[in-house]
Image (spheres, rainbow, N blue to C red):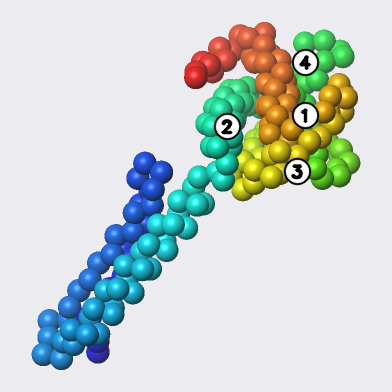
Amino acid sequence: MSPYCFWIRNNVREKGLYLCIIEFQLNPYLLVSFNSSKMKKLITTAVLLGCIFIISGQSADIPRTPFTQMYLPVWEEARDHCLEIAKAMPEELYSYKPTEVSKTFGEQMVHIGYTIELLTKRYVRGMEVVPDTPDANEMTKEEILELLESGFSYTTEVIYTIEQSQLDETCVMYHSGNTVSRAFAFFYVQDHLTNHRAKANLYLRMNGIDPPEYTW
């Protein structure tokens, strides 16, 4: 049995940093065999391991560019408010639409959830994508919420991992024909979902439901 042991007890996020708490314990029955040289090596290894965890924790928790670090809280606020609106509408009213030519509430939410990922792939990452929107009429409220969360998660991951060289590239917007940076395209993804979220917000009011309070 070893006279000593150590382990990382926890990996705690504190103000954007990951703190590694290292515990060390001597075996009280084998103190006689204590070896100071081995102990120094052991402690050094533990400290180095803790530093590695701290560095990897920070890099995984912070976007890689100044722009995406600035944009992340803006995106998270948009995500949270959209999900609140989607959850506020009862499932039996997901088929509601104010006019014959309007999308239903469910279709608005599916359009948001699906195009978040599609537009991020097309304009932010420069990928070739072919639209294939799911049919909201064949989906439950829970399935639509999962689609929304999946779309938001995809773009959030891109925000964390995209490099500055990619953000500096340009792309041509489909509707306007304008040439913009891929960084600017993030705002298009957000503006597009805001447009449809605002319409869905009105659907709530038209059914006597107070929409979630907008905060910033």
The answer to whether mark 4 and mark 3 are in CB contact below 8 A is no
The answer to whether mark 4 and mark 2 are in CB contact below 8 A is no
Compute the Cα span from label 1 to label 2: 17 Å
The residue sitting at 64% across, 46% down in the picture is 163
Where is 122 relative to 9, above or below? above
Marks 2 and 3, the one that precedes in the sequence? 2
Left or right: residue 97 compared with residue 201 = right
| Image mark for residue 40 | none
Amino acid type assigned to the residue bearing label 3 in the image: Arg
Closer to viewer: mark 4 or mark 3: 3
- The residue identified by callout 1 is 180
Where is 214 relative to 38, above or below? above
Mark 2 residue element: helix
Marks 4 and 2, the one that precedes in the sequence? 2
Closer to viewer: mark 1 or mark 4: 1
| Image mark for residue 125 | 3
The residue sitting at 68% across, 34% down in the picture is 183
Disc 2 crowd, CA 10 A, few/some/many (<14, 14-19, 20+): some
Left or right: residue 128 compared with residue 115 = right
Amino acid type assigned to the residue bearing label 2 in the image: Tyr
Disc 3 crowd, CA 10 A, few/some/many (<14, 14-19, 20+): some
Residue 146 visible in the displayed image? no
